[in-house]
Image: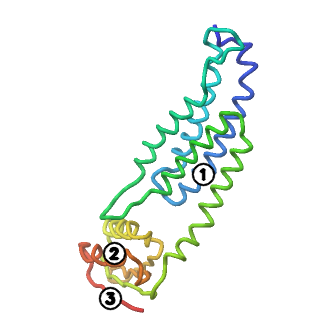
Amino acid sequence: MPESWETLHRLLPGYAGQLGMALLCGLLLGLERETKDKPAGLRTIILITLGSTVYMIVSGLIPLVTEGPEDTTRADPSRIAAQVVTGIGFLGAGTIIQSRGTIHGLTTAASIWVAAGIGLCIGIGFPIVALGITLLVLLILVTLEPLGKRLHRRGEERYLKLILPNDVLLLRRLENVLRQHSGLQDQMTLEEQPDDTLHVTIRYFEAQPSTPRLLEALSRLEGVRGASYAS
């Protein structure tokens, strides 16, 4: 029987360290995605890093249960790694959402793809390298997003002011519309009025490619009582 106490005593410490590192790397990446309310959040990223690590661990256990001389290669770890890469592509595709000509979720899909690679790196026996890659990915996700937004926002700064009823569902629909157009939900400010209405101010840039679609989508939003522009 391959799974003996002797075998477990010899293998478990190393595997426990690998799984712990996979948990740490998944936690770091997942927290970044979770704080930004992305489709693949904390639990998803952790499970991906852990799962890909487990698959590589399994690829190393296969020679222990197959028959043949010890000096004969009976398992190819790269085959399992290739299947993980193929399978993670389907999971990443599920996070990509297309809405009215705008594609969302590519960064999250890329994060899933990298998380799987980090897990494979840990499972093959390079946890320190995997941790370094994790920190590099976090640096890219955290520091390059403001730069990308700054490069994207070219043109005249404008403000769109809306008057809405103080309705949570309507506000959520408005946030969804803004999220679908360059993530403008972060540029929205609210002011509650004594007459139980909300004055919403949206900051945007006239030269943004999504501006015409944004204004068209807002015009179709039911419940808007008034709209005005200001420079």
Q: Secondary structure at mark 2?
A: helix
Q: Earlier in the sequence, mark 1 or mark 2?
A: 1
Q: Secondary structure at mark 1?
A: helix
What is the spatial separation of the Cα atoms under label 1 and label 3, in whole angstroms? 41 Å
Q: How many marks?
A: 3
- 22 over 160 or under it: above or below: above
Does residue 96 appear left or right of residue 142 in this picture?
Answer: left
Q: Secondary structure at mark 3?
A: strand
- How packed mark 2 is, by other alpha carbons closer than 10 Å (few <14, some 14-19, many 20 or more), is some
> Which residue shows up at 32% across the image and 88% down it?
228
Does residue 222 appear left or right of residue 70 in this picture?
Answer: left
Mark carried by residue 29: 1
Residue assigned mark 2 = 214
Mark carried by residue 52: none
Percent x, y of residue 51: 56, 35
Report the mark closest to the observer, 1 or 3.
Answer: 1
**Quadrant placement of the N terminus:** top right
Mark carried by residue 228: 3
- How packed mark 1 is, by other alpha carbons closer than 10 Å (few <14, some 14-19, many 20 or more), is many
Tell me the amino acid under the disc marked 1: Leu
Percent x, y of residue 155: 46, 85
> Which residue shows up at 33% across the image and 82% down it?
162
- Are circles 1 and 3 on residues that touch, CB within 8 Å? no
Tell me the amino acid under the disc marked 3: Ser
- 87 over 226 or under it: above or below: above
* Residue 108 vs residue 12, the one in the foreground: 108
Q: Quadrant of residue 23?
A: top right
What is the spatial separation of the Cα atoms under label 1 and label 2, in whole angstroms? 31 Å
Q: Earlier in the sequence, mark 1 or mark 3?
A: 1
